[in-house]
Structure formats: C-alpha cells, structure tokens
Image (cartoon, rainbow, N blue to C red):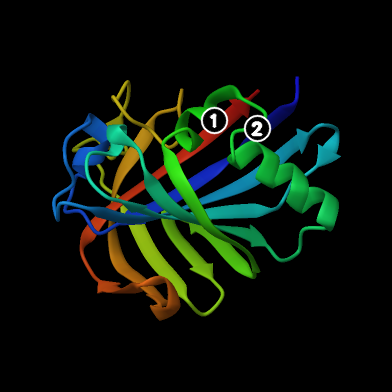
Amino acid sequence: MAYELEGRLLEVCDCNILCPCWVGEDPDPGTCDSVEGYHIDRGTVDGVDVSGLTLAVLSHIPGNILNGNHRVVLFVDDRATPQQREALLKVWTGKLGGPVAEVAQLWGEVVAVEMAPITFTVQGGRGTLRIGQAIEAELAPYQGPTGETTTLTNTPFSTIPGSPAYVAKASKYRVTLPDLGYDIDLQGHNAIQGSFRFQG
C-alpha cells in the first residue's frame, strides 16, 4: 500500500448553496472557483510520515466538473520537509492511484505548486482555513432538526471519495491572487466539511 491517510476536509467555492458540482450539474456562476484544504491527522506515504500536515488545492473549474480540464494551484504546508512535500505531491497529482487520483484525473493543468503557511482548525464544528495572506475562509455546517449535521452521501462527484460530506455555509471566502487571476471576496456561499480515509 503506497499511502494511508486519515484527516479532515474544509472546502469553499463561489457557487450558491448547495454547490451543483457535487451532484454532477453545472456550477451556478457557469464556472466554479474553489479551495479545498486537506488536513492529515495521521498518515504515511511510501513510509514517509505526513501526520499533522495540510495540503490545499485552489481550483478553477471551467464548466461541468465531470468534464475535467480544471486549472489548479497546489499549496503545501511550509512545515513539510522536502521528503514530505514530494510524498504529498505524488499522492495529490495522482501518481500513486487510489481515491485521490479519481479527483486529480479531472485536472487539466497544475499552474503552480507553492509552499505556504496553512492554518486549518475546526472548533465546535466551525472551520477556519487560511493559506498565507492570500486565502481565507470561515465556515460552519448546517444541522437538521435533531441537531445532526446535514450530510451528503453517494454523490456523483466528491472531493473525499468514499466518505460522507457535511453541507456547510461560508461566512467568509477570500482569495487575493491577482497574478493568477483570482480576486474573490464573498460571504454566504457554498462550503463543505468532512473527514476522509484515503488508501492507495
């Protein structure tokens, strides 16, 4: 087994709630600009311990998500050693197969790979994701009448294949990367939270 990773996801995008991409429909604005933060609570890749690190994906999806051709920027936790960085990139670029490769196969171009300080926290269900000075998101999941978190399962598309996702709302979603064509500052748009267990 090349990798075994357990952790948590925080995801935001510029679609309304709920993002149509998750059910295989076209995104609300016609395109979708999203950020996914994957925090690894425990895990190894080819014997390299990557526990405690976070990798984030900034994606521009030009139309229906299942048609692929996404433009992505990868952000690797700046606390990662060169060996850990290489291990994480092998997983998230699909080189080691498994469920992560199911998502990576939709990418048309990796525009850049950057090291950055990444803050990933979940407290009382409320999530915060910060990537350097350029990206910031705050989100919280919806709850049903019993107090249980509203859940998506068995969707046509998922950034955490095999795991349920929690429908959430982002009170803040900001991306300031003018060199890459990103200038986003939104409130009250789609978000997703969840846990994952990836094996490949």
Report crowding for label 1: few under 14, some 14 to 19, many 20 or more residues within 10 A (C-alpha): some
Q: Position of residue 162 (x, y in %)?
A: 46, 23
Q: Which mark is residue 101?
A: 1
Using the rendered image of the protein, determine whether residue 99 is visible from the camera's viewpoint. Answer: yes
Q: CA distance from mark 1 to mark 2?
A: 7 Å
Is residue 66 shown left or right of residue 180? left
Is residue 172 shown left or right of residue 77? left
Q: Position of residue 67 (x, y in %)?
A: 29, 34
Q: Which mark is residue 95?
A: 2
Tag 1: amino acid = Ala
**As drawn, 128 above or below 148:** below
Q: Residue at x 59, y 41 (%)?
A: 92
Sooner in the amino-acid sequence: mark 1 or mark 2: 2
| Between 164 and 143, the one nearer to me in the picture | 164
| Quadrant housing the N terminus | top right
Q: Position of residue 107 (x, y in %)?
A: 44, 42
Q: Say if mark 1 contacts mark 2, CB within 8 Å.
A: yes
| Between 155 and 85, the one nearer to me in the picture | 85
